[in-house]
Structures are given as C-alpha cells and as structure tokens.
Image: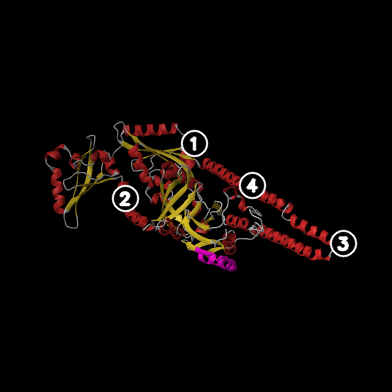
Amino acid sequence: MQLNNDLIFRNLSEGIFVLDETGKIVACNDAASIITGYENAEIENQPFHSIGDGHDDPIKYRYELDQALKRKKFVAEGWKVRKDRSRYWAETSYSPVFDESGQHKGFCVLLRDITEKKQQQFDILESEERYRLMVEAIRDYSIFMLDPDGYVVTWNDGGSLIHGYAESEILGKHFSVFYTEGDLLDEKPSKKLQLAREQGSYREEGWRVKKGGSLFWASVVLTALFNEQNKLIGFSKVTSDLTDRLKSEEVLRQSEARYRSLVEQVGDYGIFMLDTKGRIVSWNEGARRIKGYNADDVIGKYFSIFYPEEDILSGKPAWELKVAKATGKYEEEGWRLRKDRTRFWANIVITAVYDTEGRLTGFSKVTRDLTERKLNEQALQDSSDRYKQLAEELSVTNNELSAVNRELEQFTAIVSHDLKEPLRTVRSFLHLMDQAIDQQKVEIIKPSIAKGILAAERMQDLIDNLLHYSQLGKIGLERQMLDVEEIIGEAIQNLGEAVEQSGAQIRVDGEVPFVYGDRVQLVQLFQNLLGNALKFTNGVAPQVNVRSWIENGSVRFVVEDNGIGISPQNLEKIFEIFRRLHFASQYPGNGVGLAVCKKVVERHKGRIWAESEQGKGARFHIMLPRN
C-alpha cells in the first residue's frame, strides 16, 4: 500500500517545519503545533526564530541557517519557549532543501522536545560533576584511585602539585614510584596494600618521592574499596604534603613567559589562560573590558561562567576543551555573557598549550566582541530582504496593473463594438418607424418595434454580464472547506432543464473529497464549464466527465466533453471577455462565461487551461491549492 506523503507529514511524532530560503515558516505539521503551542496560521510567514528561545534572536538564527547550508545539516540544542511562555529543551535539526537544478529553495527543520531526557542526563552529570569538581578542586591533598594491584587509575590537581606528575604521566603506573629506595627494598608498598585490605584502611606519615627525585614528608591514608559482593575493587589514597614547598623557578619562568606573550598581542581582544581543567589562571585588560570582570573576580573559576545556561547544561565548555585538546584548536561564534549577565556575540579561539616535552599545560583563550558587526550585518540583511520584498510587491502590482490595462483595452473595444451594435440597431429601427409613420406604412411599425426591443434586450444582457464580470474582483472570498461532490451536484442541479433537454450524461469520478474556497464562485465555475459542454455539441447527446485527484500537493479537476472542440490557435483566446468563436444564431451567449471561470480560478490562486482539437471535444483543466 502506498502511503500519502501529506499523511506521513501530518502524523510524524517529531515537529516538522518547512521554511523558505529566507528562513520564514511556510508550513508545519500537527506535532510542531503540539510542541510549540502555535497553530499553523499563527506562525505562517513568520521567521522561525520568533517562536524560539524567547529572545527573538535573528543573529543566532541566521548563523544556524548559514551553518546548515555550509554543512548540509546543522543540529542545535537549547531552551525554547512555547506560546504559553513555558520552557522546554529542544533538539533542532536544520536541513537545506534544493530543487532538481541544485538551487536552494528553503529548509526542513526537525524539532524534538527532549526535556525529560536532558533532565535525566543533567541529574546524572550534576551528581558526577559535583563529586569530580570536589575531588579535582582540592589542591592541598593528592587524591587518587588505585586498582587492586596498586596501579594508578585516577588523578587530581593536588596530585600534580604534591607529586609533580601530570595526569598523562602517572595513569597506569604503580604507586610504588612514590616510595624511597629503602621502602622498596623492604617491600613496603605491597605490605601497606595488604594491611589496608585486611583492616579496611591504613594511615601513616613518612618520606615520599616526587617526580624529580626530591623528598617530602607526607601524611598518607590508604583505604580499601569493596563492591556490593564484598569483592575488592581497588584503593583510595589521600596524601598531604607536610613540608614547606615553593614553586620551582622553571615553572614560574614559564608562567611569566606565557603571560608576557599574551599581553604583547593585546588589542581589542580578551586573552587569558586556562589550566588543563578549564580554570582561569590569567586575565588581561582586553578580557576585563569585554567581559566586565576584574582578575580577582575570575582567577581560579571554571571558564563556563561566560556561557549561557543552555550551553552549560549541554556540556559545551568541557566539549570545547576536548576538541581543542584533540585537534589543537577550537573556534566558533556564539553568545557569551558579561559580568552584568548581558549578552554579546563572540568569536572565540581556544588553543591547547604544551610544554617543551609535549605535555599539555593548559589552554589559551582569545575572545572578540562581534556584536556591533553582527548587528550591522543583520541590518544590511534586513534592508536587503525589505528591498526584495518591495521589488516583489512592485512586480505583483505591475502585473496587476498590466492585467487591468488589458481589461480596459478590451472594455474599450467592447464599448466601441458590442455595446454600440445594439444601439445602432435600435436607432435604425426608430428611424424606420419614423419614416413609416410619415409614409403611413403601419405594417412596418410593429416588426420594427419587435426588432428594436430584441436589440435593447441584447444590450441589457451585455451590460449585465459586463457588470457581473467587473464585480468578481471586488467581492471578498468566503473561504471554507467544501464537499466537492456537493459543489458539482449543485452546478448540475442548476442546469437541470438544459441537461434534460439535451439528453446529456454527466459522470463525476472524483478522488478528492474536499476543497477550500468560495462556495458561490466555485459552483459558478463548474456551472459555466458544464453549461458550455451542453451547449457546444455537434448534434449528438453530450457525454461529460468530471474527474479530480491530488497532484503535487494541489487539487486537479478535468471537465471533458464530446462536443465540437476548439481549434489550437483559439485555446488562449476563449478566456477573453466577450470573445466568441461562433455566431449567436448558432450557439447563443455573450462570451463571458469562460472569462468568469478564469477570474474565479485566479482569485483562488489557481490556474485554468484548455486542451482540444476541432471536432474532437474539449478538456478544461483546473489546478487549485489544496489548502
């Protein structure tokens, strides 16, 4: 069974928005309305960012669209605001849409409400992060884990400060590297593990060895760790340095050199250093000017204080450091926060910094405030959009004026010919009657009066039809969902006498149950088409078929007859007002019906055309928007 694409679109559980190339909403499905709280009619032709995060943020929105075009797909996460102002955490996936020639036509946006999933992740991360930050932030104690055999599996900043080893140097090594040669000969490390295993924990003070071989007096607590099955899974080891220690001159020299190197490059840039965990260790004047913090406000704090809440909840700061460490550098643009919590659009570059031995010592972070430039770019884009919109409106207006001008030219021709012709006839017969009276030819007067009356009636019909046609564009459309079978049935009922007299057979074969439009005008449309099919016959009983189906998102109608047909050179002319291809004595009428049909269809944003050959019947095609 082949599924209808529109049915799939409406029933998907994810919210789907269709945007034009400027980012304005063209359509959305039911799930999108449920997630955002907005009905399709409320947000149609609105920019997608206007139903976003509550900030009405065109800069970020334009950046996301540009990234989607550049990457062919762009996924963003963050808080969004429903119509009732409640917040939800959304995953938004942008995909550009291209036509067959490769021209960009718009975007398809997939929107998911993942608030519950994100909250669960956040709860877990928050719990783990509290413990990790608590341990890692301790600088006066070396706190790390050993496996059951005594090999180091975790490391904290206190361990680096006290023992001198970076995390990358010590992980996987046996903890005996901290013991003196005498302790190793005495097999003290293995004995202490055994005591901790038997007693649960072991405490002592003694000499320990730093990375470079120097000694320090240490207080040590070694604790055995067991799982729920009472199986040993490892040990925790807490060490504190009880000696007075000074930073080595080499570390101080490297720190001062890094700081001088950064200061020398200061212009309108915020430049500062982070340690390997992302905590701020230096601050420059550019950073103070851009972000509003003094050095005392930020030194030692995690650099996420500059990020919006949604970036923090999604783990973005830590992810940026991970990318910088893996690739050497991370660069992006996005919103950042000043000390007063106002936002600015920033370009940031995070660079991993290594020592002479290739060990990661931290990160440099360079920030530029691009807010003013982005606002200028947005103003330029808005101006361009307004210009394009004005050009489109002028083009539409010009086309409408051209159409009006053509109608005025036709009207002039009608007045000069069709309307004058019955006037000339009436005047001619009045002169004839005047002469008959003078000549006392009474027998001529009555026929002349009858012919004059017929000419006046024809003139009245022409004027009525012209007024009816001109009023079509002034009467407002009353759009509603209409039953197609009822509309066509009403048109056939209105032609009941003509159908009976002609012996016509009208067959309706429709796949479309409903259409949106003005009931009166659509009935008139089908009544005119069916009336022509009954009128323009070649002496046989009319056979008329009315069919309908969905085609490329539109409703297509075809009215087909077995009449006299239309020559190819006249297929366009037949929709002109008062255009007649036959004498009135052959096929009576005023040449207004098809002109009315064309105007009705165009007012419904549709299209009508005819296909025919002389003597082989005619087929009238109508395309109307489905919605």
Which label sits on residue 388?
Answer: none
Q: Nearer the viewer, residue 437 or 104?
A: 437
Residue occupying the point 79% across, 60% down = 429
Which amino acid does the dot numbered 1 rest on? Asp
Which amino acid does the dot numbered 2 rest on? Met
Mark 3 neighbour density, 10 Å: few (under 14) some (14–19) many (20 or more): few
- Secondary-structure class at tag 3: loop
Mark 2 neighbour density, 10 Å: few (under 14) some (14–19) many (20 or more): few
**Magenta region: which residues?**
484-507
3D distance between C-alphas at marks 4 and 3: 60 Å
Q: Are marks 1 and 4 in contact (CB under 8 Å)?
A: no
**Badge 4 is on which residue?**
398
The part of the image, by quadrant, that contains residue 324 is top left
Q: Are marks 3 and 2 in contact (CB under 8 Å)?
A: no
Mark nearer the viewer, 1 or 4 = 4
Residue occupying the point 17% across, 48% down = 148
Q: Position of residue 264 (x, y in %)?
A: 44, 31
Which amino acid does the dot numbered 4 rest on? Asn
Mark positioned earlier in the residue sequence (3 or 2): 2
Mark 1 neighbour density, 10 Å: few (under 14) some (14–19) many (20 or more): some
- Secondary-structure class at tag 4: helix
Mark nearer the viewer, 3 or 2 = 3
Q: Nearer the viewer, residue 204 or 316?
A: 316
Mark positioned earlier in the residue sequence (1 or 4): 1
Majority secondary structure of the magenta segment?
helix
